[in-house]
Image: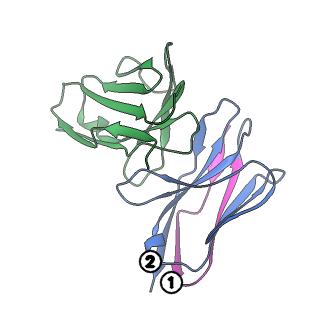
Protein backbone atom coordinates (compact mmCIF):
# COMPACT_ATOMS: atom_id res chain seq x y z
CA UNK A 1 0.00 0.00 0.00
CA UNK A 2 0.89 3.64 -0.03
CA UNK A 3 1.34 5.58 3.16
CA UNK A 4 2.67 9.00 4.04
CA UNK A 5 2.95 9.98 7.70
CA UNK A 6 3.56 13.35 9.28
CA UNK A 7 2.65 14.75 12.69
CA UNK A 8 -0.80 16.26 12.93
CA UNK A 9 0.11 19.35 14.92
CA UNK A 10 3.19 21.20 16.08
CA UNK A 11 3.74 24.36 18.08
CA UNK A 12 6.82 26.55 18.05
CA UNK A 13 7.94 29.96 19.21
CA UNK A 14 8.54 32.98 17.02
CA UNK A 15 12.21 33.18 16.06
CA UNK A 16 12.87 29.52 16.74
CA UNK A 17 13.59 26.59 14.42
CA UNK A 18 11.11 23.79 13.75
CA UNK A 19 11.52 20.50 11.91
CA UNK A 20 8.52 18.75 10.39
CA UNK A 21 9.13 15.10 9.58
CA UNK A 22 7.56 12.98 6.87
CA UNK A 23 7.95 9.24 6.31
CA UNK A 24 6.62 7.50 3.26
CA UNK A 25 6.02 4.10 1.73
CA UNK A 26 4.89 4.33 -1.87
CA UNK A 27 4.89 2.18 -4.96
CA UNK A 28 7.33 4.13 -7.06
CA UNK A 29 9.07 7.39 -6.29
CA UNK A 30 9.57 10.38 -8.53
CA UNK A 31 10.31 13.07 -5.99
CA UNK A 32 8.96 14.55 -2.79
CA UNK A 33 7.26 17.91 -2.46
CA UNK A 34 6.56 20.18 0.46
CA UNK A 35 3.70 22.66 0.29
CA UNK A 36 2.44 25.38 2.61
CA UNK A 37 -1.29 25.88 2.92
CA UNK A 38 -2.98 28.70 4.81
CA UNK A 39 -6.53 28.19 5.94
CA UNK A 40 -9.01 28.58 3.09
CA UNK A 41 -6.33 28.84 0.42
CA UNK A 42 -4.72 26.51 -2.10
CA UNK A 43 -1.30 25.00 -1.35
CA UNK A 44 1.80 26.87 -2.43
CA UNK A 45 5.01 25.14 -3.47
CA UNK A 46 7.92 25.21 -1.02
CA UNK A 47 10.42 22.59 -2.14
CA UNK A 48 11.11 19.54 -4.26
CA UNK A 49 13.64 16.78 -3.52
CA UNK A 50 14.39 13.91 -5.84
CA UNK A 51 17.97 13.14 -4.76
CA UNK A 52 19.24 12.48 -1.25
CA UNK A 53 20.43 15.46 0.68
CA UNK A 54 19.51 18.92 1.80
CA UNK A 55 17.95 21.62 -0.36
CA UNK A 56 18.09 25.11 1.12
CA UNK A 57 15.94 28.02 0.06
CA UNK A 58 16.08 31.00 2.36
CA UNK A 59 14.53 30.24 5.73
CA UNK A 60 13.23 26.91 4.45
CA UNK A 61 15.23 23.73 3.91
CA UNK A 62 14.14 20.25 2.96
CA UNK A 63 15.99 16.98 3.38
CA UNK A 64 15.47 13.62 1.73
CA UNK A 65 16.74 10.11 2.42
CA UNK A 66 15.32 7.73 -0.18
CA UNK A 67 16.75 4.62 1.48
CA UNK A 68 14.95 5.48 4.71
CA UNK A 69 11.77 6.79 3.09
CA UNK A 70 12.20 9.95 5.11
CA UNK A 71 12.10 13.68 4.60
CA UNK A 72 11.94 16.74 6.77
CA UNK A 73 11.12 20.40 6.29
CA UNK A 74 13.17 22.80 8.40
CA UNK A 75 11.87 26.28 9.08
CA UNK A 76 14.27 28.78 10.59
CA UNK A 77 13.68 32.17 12.21
CA UNK A 78 10.02 31.42 12.56
CA UNK A 79 7.57 34.22 11.92
CA UNK A 80 3.93 34.46 12.92
CA UNK A 81 2.95 34.26 9.25
CA UNK A 82 4.48 30.77 9.11
CA UNK A 83 1.47 29.48 11.03
CA UNK A 84 -0.12 27.20 8.43
CA UNK A 85 -0.48 23.59 7.38
CA UNK A 86 2.53 21.95 5.78
CA UNK A 87 1.84 19.15 3.34
CA UNK A 88 4.29 16.42 2.38
CA UNK A 89 3.52 14.82 -0.99
CA UNK A 90 5.22 12.07 -2.97
CA UNK A 91 5.13 11.92 -6.74
CA UNK A 92 4.64 8.41 -8.02
CA UNK A 93 6.03 6.98 -11.24
CA UNK A 94 2.79 7.96 -12.99
CA UNK A 95 3.17 11.59 -11.95
CA UNK A 96 0.38 11.50 -9.40
CA UNK A 97 0.87 13.31 -6.10
CA UNK A 98 0.03 11.41 -2.94
CA UNK A 99 -0.40 13.69 0.05
CA UNK A 100 0.20 13.15 3.72
CA UNK A 101 -2.47 14.36 6.13
CA UNK A 102 -0.64 17.63 6.70
CA UNK A 103 0.98 19.17 9.79
CA UNK A 104 -0.67 22.21 11.33
CA UNK A 105 2.02 24.49 12.70
CA UNK A 106 1.15 27.15 15.23
CA UNK A 107 3.74 29.82 15.85
CA UNK A 108 3.39 31.59 19.18
CA UNK A 109 4.89 34.95 20.20
CA UNK B 1 2.27 35.46 -10.94
CA UNK B 2 -0.13 32.56 -11.05
CA UNK B 3 0.37 30.04 -13.82
CA UNK B 4 -2.77 28.03 -13.09
CA UNK B 5 -6.11 29.76 -12.65
CA UNK B 6 -9.41 28.39 -11.42
CA UNK B 7 -12.90 29.78 -11.74
CA UNK B 8 -15.13 30.30 -9.86
CA UNK B 9 -13.41 30.73 -6.53
CA UNK B 10 -16.67 30.23 -4.67
CA UNK B 11 -19.99 28.84 -5.80
CA UNK B 12 -23.22 27.97 -4.05
CA UNK B 13 -25.69 25.74 -5.80
CA UNK B 14 -28.93 24.01 -4.98
CA UNK B 15 -29.05 20.30 -4.32
CA UNK B 16 -29.71 18.39 -7.53
CA UNK B 17 -28.19 20.94 -9.87
CA UNK B 18 -24.85 20.79 -11.68
CA UNK B 19 -21.91 23.12 -11.38
CA UNK B 20 -18.85 23.54 -13.58
CA UNK B 21 -15.36 24.51 -12.38
CA UNK B 22 -12.69 25.62 -14.84
CA UNK B 23 -8.94 25.17 -14.58
CA UNK B 24 -6.71 27.07 -16.98
CA UNK B 25 -2.98 27.00 -17.54
CA UNK B 26 -1.93 30.57 -18.26
CA UNK B 27 1.62 30.49 -19.64
CA UNK B 28 2.04 26.95 -20.85
CA UNK B 29 0.27 24.08 -22.49
CA UNK B 30 -0.88 21.41 -20.10
CA UNK B 31 -1.44 17.98 -21.57
CA UNK B 32 -2.19 16.70 -18.08
CA UNK B 33 -4.04 18.33 -15.23
CA UNK B 34 -4.98 16.89 -11.86
CA UNK B 35 -8.16 17.46 -9.87
CA UNK B 36 -8.13 17.21 -6.07
CA UNK B 37 -10.74 17.51 -3.38
CA UNK B 38 -10.12 18.66 0.17
CA UNK B 39 -12.62 18.37 3.00
CA UNK B 40 -12.23 20.58 6.09
CA UNK B 41 -9.21 19.73 8.21
CA UNK B 42 -8.18 16.97 5.82
CA UNK B 43 -5.47 16.70 3.22
CA UNK B 44 -5.82 16.77 -0.54
CA UNK B 45 -7.19 13.66 -2.22
CA UNK B 46 -6.59 13.09 -5.91
CA UNK B 47 -9.88 12.63 -7.74
CA UNK B 48 -8.78 12.21 -11.32
CA UNK B 49 -6.12 12.87 -13.90
CA UNK B 50 -7.33 14.94 -16.83
CA UNK B 51 -5.70 14.15 -20.18
CA UNK B 52 -6.01 16.47 -23.15
CA UNK B 53 -7.88 14.82 -25.98
CA UNK B 54 -8.70 11.62 -24.13
CA UNK B 55 -10.75 10.34 -21.24
CA UNK B 56 -9.87 11.23 -17.70
CA UNK B 57 -8.46 8.63 -15.36
CA UNK B 58 -10.40 8.44 -12.12
CA UNK B 59 -9.11 7.30 -8.74
CA UNK B 60 -10.76 4.41 -6.99
CA UNK B 61 -14.01 5.38 -5.36
CA UNK B 62 -14.59 8.50 -7.49
CA UNK B 63 -17.75 8.29 -9.60
CA UNK B 64 -16.90 9.23 -13.15
CA UNK B 65 -20.55 9.83 -14.05
CA UNK B 66 -20.92 12.28 -11.21
CA UNK B 67 -17.67 14.16 -11.65
CA UNK B 68 -17.39 14.84 -15.37
CA UNK B 69 -14.00 15.98 -16.59
CA UNK B 70 -13.38 17.51 -19.97
CA UNK B 71 -9.92 18.50 -21.23
CA UNK B 72 -10.73 19.76 -24.70
CA UNK B 73 -7.77 22.07 -25.15
CA UNK B 74 -4.18 22.31 -23.96
CA UNK B 75 -5.02 25.16 -21.62
CA UNK B 76 -8.40 24.23 -20.17
CA UNK B 77 -9.82 21.43 -18.10
CA UNK B 78 -13.30 21.50 -16.59
CA UNK B 79 -14.82 19.56 -13.72
CA UNK B 80 -18.60 19.34 -13.63
CA UNK B 81 -20.23 18.12 -10.46
CA UNK B 82 -23.55 16.68 -11.60
CA UNK B 83 -26.64 16.31 -9.43
CA UNK B 84 -24.78 17.90 -6.55
CA UNK B 85 -25.61 16.96 -2.97
CA UNK B 86 -24.62 18.62 0.29
CA UNK B 87 -21.94 15.97 0.86
CA UNK B 88 -20.21 17.21 -2.31
CA UNK B 89 -19.54 20.51 -0.57
CA UNK B 90 -15.76 20.77 -0.53
CA UNK B 91 -12.69 22.64 -1.74
CA UNK B 92 -11.79 21.56 -5.27
CA UNK B 93 -8.28 22.28 -6.52
CA UNK B 94 -6.54 21.62 -9.82
CA UNK B 95 -2.88 21.47 -10.69
CA UNK B 96 -1.10 21.31 -14.02
CA UNK B 97 1.44 18.90 -15.31
CA UNK B 98 4.55 20.18 -13.59
CA UNK B 99 2.81 19.69 -10.24
CA UNK B 100 4.39 22.65 -8.58
CA UNK B 101 1.54 25.08 -9.02
CA UNK B 102 -2.04 24.74 -7.97
CA UNK B 103 -4.98 26.81 -9.01
CA UNK B 104 -6.54 29.08 -6.41
CA UNK B 105 -9.13 26.44 -5.58
CA UNK B 106 -12.91 26.51 -5.77
CA UNK B 107 -15.18 26.34 -2.74
CA UNK B 108 -18.38 24.52 -3.54
CA UNK B 109 -21.31 24.73 -1.17
CA UNK B 110 -24.40 22.70 -1.98
CA UNK B 111 -27.53 23.79 -0.15
Q: Chain of mark 1?
A: A
Whether residue A83 is situated above or below residue A64 in the rendered picture: below
For label 1, count other residues whose C-alpha is less than 10 Å away and answer few (under 14), some (14-19) or many (20+). Answer: some
Secondary structure mainly formed by the magenta segment? strand
The answer to whether residue B94 is above or below residue B16 is below
Query: In the image, is residue B49 above or below residue A57?
Result: above
Contact (CB < 8 A) between labels 1 and 2?
A: yes
**In which quadrant is the C terminus of chain A drawn?**
bottom left
Q: How far is mark 1 from mark 2, CA to CA? A: 6 Å
Tell me which segment is drawn in magenta.
A1-24
Instruction: Tell me if A105 is positioned left or right of A98 in this view.
Output: left
Chain that bears disc 2: A
Say which residue appears at 44% left-offset and 27% top-offset.
Answer: B75
Q: Secondary structure at mark 1?
A: loop
Is residue A20 among what the camera can see? yes
Residue drawn at point x = 44 percent, y = 19 percent: B73
Q: Position of residue B35 (x, y in %)?
A: 45, 33
Q: Which quarter of the rendered picture does the N terminus of chain A lie within?
A: top right
Q: Position of residue B20 (x, y in %)?
A: 28, 27
Snapshot colouring: by chain
User: Which chain corresponds to the colour blue?
Assistant: A
- Point 61% across, 59% down: residue: A6
Q: Please give the residue where the numbered disc 2 appears in the rendered image.
A: A80
Mark 1 vs mark 2: which is more N-terminal? 1
Q: Residue at x 44, y 72 (%)?
A: A81
Which residue in the structure is indicated by mark 1?
A: A14
Amino acid sequence: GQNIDQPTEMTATEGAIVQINCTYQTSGFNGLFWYQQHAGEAPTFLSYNVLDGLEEKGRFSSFLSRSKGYSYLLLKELQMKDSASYLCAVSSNTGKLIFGQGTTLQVKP
Amino acid sequence: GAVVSQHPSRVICKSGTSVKIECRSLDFQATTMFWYRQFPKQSLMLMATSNEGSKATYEQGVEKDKFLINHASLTLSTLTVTSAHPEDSSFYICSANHLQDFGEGSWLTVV
